[in-house]
Amino acid sequence: MRNSTSNWLDNAKVWGQHSPCTRRKVGAIIVARPWDADFLVLGKGFNVGPEDEPSCEQGGCPRGRLSYEECAAYSDYRSGPGRCHATHAEVRAIEDFTKDMDGVTIDASVPGWGFRLPYRPIMFVSEVPCKYCWKAIDHAGIGAIFPKGPRR
C-alpha cells in the first residue's frame, strides 16, 4: 500500500535529515487523508535553530556543545545547561500548515469564518514528541499523531 503508516513515517524521517541539529534530526509531516489516493501534504517541518544565530553545525547549539554525560539524551529541552534553542519539527510543521490559513477552522465544532476542513489532519513524526510538542499538536487540532516509537 503506497500510503501506509510506515511510508509516512519514513517520509518524516527523510524530511528530518534537512535538520542541522547535531544531536537529533527530527522531521514531521501533516497529511490529510493519508490512506486515500487523494492524500494532501498540508505541512512539514524539521528542527532548526533561529535564523539569526549560528546553526547547530556551526556550534550555535547549547545542547550540542555538551557531551552525553553532561546532557543525557531525552533530558529536559527547556531548561538547564542543555536547553535547546531550536524550534521543534512538530511546531514548524504546524506553522507551515497554518501560515496561509487566515480564517480556516480545522475542527468543525469550533466556530469560525472561511472554509472548514471536513476532516482532522494527521501528523507523522520521526521521533516521539516532547511534552511541549504534544500540547502544541493538541491545540492545533491535529486529529491523530503517529510517532516513531513509544510515548515518553
Image (tube, rainbow, N blue to C red):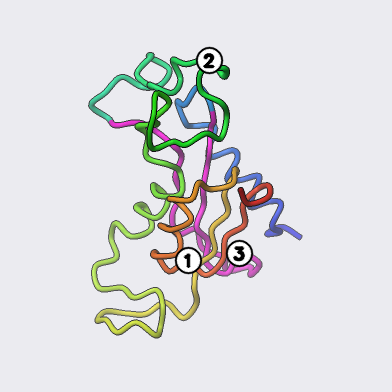
- Graded by Cα atoms within 10 Å as few (under 14), some (14 to 19) or many (20 or more), the crowding at tag 1 reads some
- Graded by Cα atoms within 10 Å as few (under 14), some (14 to 19) or many (20 or more), the crowding at tag 3 reads many
Residue 122: where, in percent of width, then height? Answer: 54, 64
Look at 49% across and 73% down and name the residue there: 120
Quarter of the image for residue 45 reads top left
Residue 118: where, in percent of width, then height? Answer: 46, 81
Q: Is residue 126 above or below residue 138?
A: above
Q: Is residue 23 above or below residue 136?
A: above
Residue 141: where, in percent of width, then height? Answer: 43, 69
Residue carrying label 2 = 67
Q: Verify CB contact (< 8 Å) between mark 3 and mark 1.
A: no
Question: Is 28 or 67 nearer to us in this picture?
Answer: 67
- Tell me which label, 3 or 1, sits earlier in the chain: 3
Task: Tell me where the magenta segment starts and ends, as one range.
Answer: 24-50
Quarter of the image for residue 33 reads bottom right
Q: Quadrant of the N terminus?
A: bottom right
Look at 37% across and 40% down and name the residue there: 87
Residue carrying label 1 = 142
| Three-letter residue code for mark 2 | Ser
Residue 34: where, in percent of width, then height? Answer: 60, 64
Residue carrying label 3 = 34
- Given this view, does label 3 or label 1 mark the residue nearer the observer? 1
Is 47 part of what is drawn in magenta?
Answer: yes
Q: Secondary structure at mark 1?
A: loop
| Three-letter residue code for mark 3 | Pro
Look at 56% across and 26% down and name the residue there: 72
| Three-letter residue code for mark 1 | Ile
- Given this view, does label 2 or label 3 mark the residue nearer the observer? 2
